[in-house]
Image (cartoon, grey):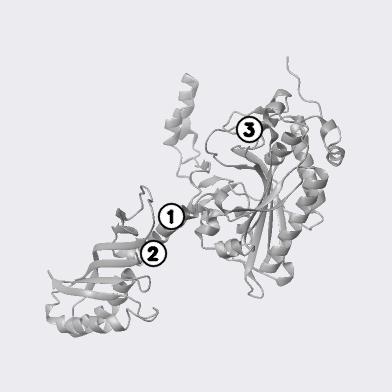
Amino acid sequence: MELKFNLKGAFKTSADPTGAKEVIAQYFDEANNTILKKGAPEGQGAKITQWDIVDGSIELTIESGRYVRAHDAIMRLKKPLAAKLGKDFRIGIRGVDVKEFTISMPAEGEIGNMNIPHVSNISKVEGGLILELDVGESELERRIPDRILTLMEEKVRAKDYGGKAEHWQIIWESDKKEHTFSGDPTQEMMKHGWIKRGASRGQWIHGPQSTKMFRTFEKIVYDELLEPLGYREMIFPKLVPWEVWQKSGHAKGVYPEIYYVCPPKTRDPAYWEEVSDHYKVTHEVPTELIKSKIGDPIGGLCYAQCPPFWMYLQGETIPTDEFPIKVFDKSGTSHRYESGGIHGMERVDEFHRVEIVWLGTKEQVIETAKKLHERYMHIFNEILDLEWRKAWVTPWFMAQEGLTGLSEQGEAGTTDYEAPLPYRGDDGEWLEFQNVSINGNKYPSGFNVKSQTGEELWSGCSGVGLERWASAFFAQKGLDPENWPEEFRKRVGEVPKGIRFL
């Protein structure tokens, strides 16, 4: 099936246009060969297939393919037609009425039930879908039909694209190692008092021992990677408003995974008195009452750590000698509502991460990523002595935004670092514990960041997840320092005593 738009609409006129029928006919004939073809490839464009004067308005049917789409065509026709009718017949056009609007688009297989704004019905036909739109002139002017089509094409690509495992290619693997531990590291850390579950879902409280491990991992990253490669520390916000996610692209699909932030409608104590009184009497927090007293969500807690950073650069032109810009943030927690069961430290809703971000020309960004890979390899091989592998994957956003070609060329895309967890068995799923992503021009373009020379800017990011590092390391090495690699043991020093309980 080919992409096709079919619009049945009408120009609402201030008086009966019957007397202008010949002029209208001549205008529509000319338009079919001029303004409705303008900007389209040879043989493409929109076409008025029929028209008539009905009940004092000009009804018409417009068909088109991808170029000069029917909704654009009717808006192109409006102003010149109004000028002709006004000059010679003193008839005005009061607006555009959309009676029927369908989009036929190619799609294979089942798409599933969907509730799309301004789409009243979706029919599955051989080779594609037919979308019936419920739109008016305002929606045409705001290009809502284009956005609906883009969304539907993304959904079709998402289905065709499939799961991440189908777009995974191993690029390096360490030697098989003898593991000194085969237990579940989370259970072992709980048993020895290193960690305890927090009050919230997917949250841990880290005791002195576990905290020392996290700080050691951070210091290794700083000493072996960040400082030698010239990264500067910054502090990124951890409350992210919608504006940031709109520009970063996360607003397209972040909703199932974020923790939402809603401010109170007012700080007036009197407004909140009934909430306080309810708790004082019942010792129960009245969540339904609270919901009525808070405002709409203004955004959410930090989900992907780097997007808020880009507001620092938004709209700026940066001198050439500043590039590559290399920064990192380790100032707070990230939050992600995980699906399914929350098992241990490797899958949490609240986690700690060092976020590494770099920006420059395409060549600089690719070279910077290469240096990061070299330092990570040094850390994982010579300090942590892990069994691990690297795999090249195409992130979903690149498939969604048509950047798979860049990924296939080995330019933009993500490298995942994975480690086996012995307690899961020889055939168990490996844990992704590190990544390096080259994001192309996604962020500089979204936040309007420019180079002094006008050259296109690219960026990359790499998240060091401390929970993931701890899960991979302790799953293979256990908690006994005697079984840790000498280089790691030297950096830890003495493991602090935990807090004792009776």
Q: Nearer the viewer, residue 126 or 27?
A: 126
The Cα–Cα distance between marks 2 and 3, rounded to whole angstroms, is: 44 Å
Q: Quadrant of the N terminus?
A: bottom left
* View extreme (top): residue: 502
Residue 345's place in the image compared with 331, above or below, is: above
* Residue 444 visible at all: no
Q: Are marks 2 and 1 in contact (CB under 8 Å)?
A: no
Mark in front: 2 vs 1 = 1
Residue type indicated by callout 1? Lys
Residue 351's place in the image compared with 197, above or below, is: below
Classed neighbour count for the residue bearing mark 1: other residues with Cα under 10 Å, few (<14), some (14–19), many (≥20): some
**Label located before the other in sequence (2 or 1):** 2
The spot of residue 3 in percent (x, y) is 35, 66
Residue 155, labelled with which disc? 1
The kind of secondary structure element at disc 1 is: helix
The spot of residue 105 in percent (x, y) is 35, 62
The spot of residue 119 in percent (x, y) is 32, 55
Residue type indicated by callout 2? Asp
The kind of secondary structure element at disc 3 is: loop
The Cα–Cα distance between marks 3 and 1, rounded to whole angstroms, is: 33 Å
The Cα–Cα distance between marks 2 and 1, rounded to whole angstroms, is: 14 Å
- Return the residue at label 3: 344
Classed neighbour count for the residue bearing mark 2: other residues with Cα under 10 Å, few (<14), some (14–19), many (≥20): some
Residue 270's place in the image compared with 81, above or below, is: above
Determine whether, in the image, residue 251 is placed left or right of residue 373. Answer: left
- Return the residue at label 2: 146
